[in-house]
Image (spheres, helix red, strand yellow):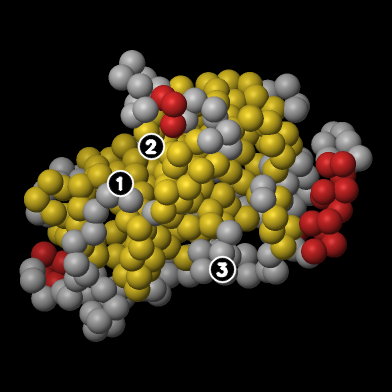
């Protein structure tokens, strides 16, 4: 096994989106090759309803997939195809926008006014940009949760991990999407596919990940549980960690433990033409999408 080092850390930045929703953006709209096949990652977390009440009114998407994971509160959604529903705490929605969809997402807080969730955008390859839209709505109770002997907890949203498979499937990026909690002061190793771009997003507690100065090669058991690893400074709430190549990451939890998302996907390695909620391969395809919007041809009939 080879250690996959943490090569960079950064803090999510405050951003306004939709109708004045206050959120934090970990990455998006810049250097799309860095996280290929992922394009954007937002953390929408608030305890003040005025900061999210406006929601995300009707807007278009084409050429991507959006992944919404709700931790607190709820999100009501509806679209131009007549679909509607509500995501509650622990629920996931994986929306394939494909050839085009108009939809809206309206968040609500829990009884204490708290709203918390994440949205990740995944790119589609050119061959699937104009595929028919579809949804995968998954209730929290359907997501496998594994509890290891040391108290580490892993929710498997997509992909295969520790003998469990997440309920979301058929996604172009073939992703691994995990919600991981490591208890206080524990050091833990997690296997990931060498050929997938991988990042972690810390949203509770704090911890350290093995960094780029750690020697490459076989990762011995004593290195995982001992003190030999060179690890980055303690990183905490709203920190994005980007990893280099390798097939295993190592995290050292802080005194309050650490909870983070671990996300990995197969790079598409295609040109990206991107404006707002529409992502295509070429500028002409992008211009065509906006012409379709202006001319009421954005939503494609079934079979076209």
Q: Which mark is residue 45?
A: 2
Whether residues under marks 1 and 2 lie with C-beta atoms below 8 angstroms apart, the answer is yes
The residue depicted at 47 percent of the width and 65 percent of the height is 197
The residue depicted at 38 percent of the width and 66 percent of the height is 242
Residue 168 percent location from the top left of the image = 52, 40
Q: Secondary structure at mark 3?
A: loop
Residue 91 appears in the picture as rendered: no
Measured along the vertical axis of the image, is residue 11 above or below residue 50? Answer: below
Seen as rendered, the residue at the extreme top is 111
Seen as rendered, the residue at the extreme right is 295
The residue depicted at 22 percent of the width and 74 percent of the height is 219
Q: Earlier in the sequence, mark 1 or mark 2?
A: 2
Q: Which mark is residue 203?
A: 1
Q: Quadrant of the C terminus?
A: top right
Residue 32 appears in the picture as rendered: yes
Sort mark 3 into few (<14), some (14-19) or many (20+) by Cα contacts within 10 Å. few
Whether residues under marks 2 and 3 lie with C-beta atoms below 8 angstroms apart, the answer is no
Residue 268 percent location from the top left of the image = 62, 65
Q: CA distance from mark 3 to mark 1?
A: 23 Å
Which of the two residues, 21 or 95, is positioned nearer the viewer here? 21
Measured along the vertical axis of the image, is residue 279 above or below residue 101? Answer: below
Q: CA distance from mark 2 to mark 3?
A: 25 Å
Q: Secondary structure at mark 1?
A: strand
Measured along the vertical axis of the image, is residue 294 above or below residue 72? Answer: below
Point out the frontmost of discs 1 and 2: 2
Q: Is residue 268 left or right of residue 35?
A: right
Which of the two residues, 258 or 114, is positioned nearer the viewer here? 114
Q: Quadrant of the N terminus?
A: bottom left
Q: Earlier in the sequence, mark 2 or mark 3?
A: 3
- Tell me the residue that label 3 is attached to: 31
């Amino acid at each position: 096994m080879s250690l996959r080092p943490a090569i960079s850390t950064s803090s999510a930045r405050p951003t306004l989106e939709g109708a004045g929703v206050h959120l934090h953006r970990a990455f998006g709209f810049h250097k799309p090759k860095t996280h290929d096949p992922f394009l954007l990652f937002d953390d929408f977390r608030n305890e003040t309803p005025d900061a999210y009440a406006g929601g995300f009114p009707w807007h278009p998407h084409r050429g991507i997939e959006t992944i919404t994971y709700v931790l607190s509160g709820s999100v009501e959604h509806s679209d131009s195809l007549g679909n509607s529903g509500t995501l509650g705490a622990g629920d996931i929605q994986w929306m394939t926008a494909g050839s085009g969809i108009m939809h809206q997402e309206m968040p609500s807080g829990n009884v204490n006014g708290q709203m918390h969730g994440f949205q990740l955008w995944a790119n589609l390859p050119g061959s699937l940009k104009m595929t028919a839209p579809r949804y995968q709505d998954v209730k929290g109770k359907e997501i496998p949760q594994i509890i290891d002997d040391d108290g580490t907890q892993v929710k498997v949203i997509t992909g295969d991990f520790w003998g469990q498979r997440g309920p979301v499937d058929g996604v172009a990026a073939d992703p691994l999407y995990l919600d991981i909690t490591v208890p206080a002061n524990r050091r833990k190793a997690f296997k990931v596919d060498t050929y997938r771009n991988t990042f972690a997003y810390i949203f509770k507690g704090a911890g350290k990940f093995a960094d780029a100065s750690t020697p490459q090669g076989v990762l011995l058991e004593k290195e995982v549980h001992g003190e030999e690893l060179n690890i980055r400074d303690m990183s905490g709430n709203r920190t994005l960690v980007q990893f280099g190549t390798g097939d295993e990451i190592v995290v050292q939890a802080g005194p309050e433990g650490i909870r983070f998302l671990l996300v990995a996907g197969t790079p598409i390695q295609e040109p990206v033409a991107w404006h707002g909620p529409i992502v295509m391969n070429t500028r002409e395809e992008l211009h065509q999408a906006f012409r379709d919007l202006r001319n009421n041809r954005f939503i494609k009939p079934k079979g076209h």
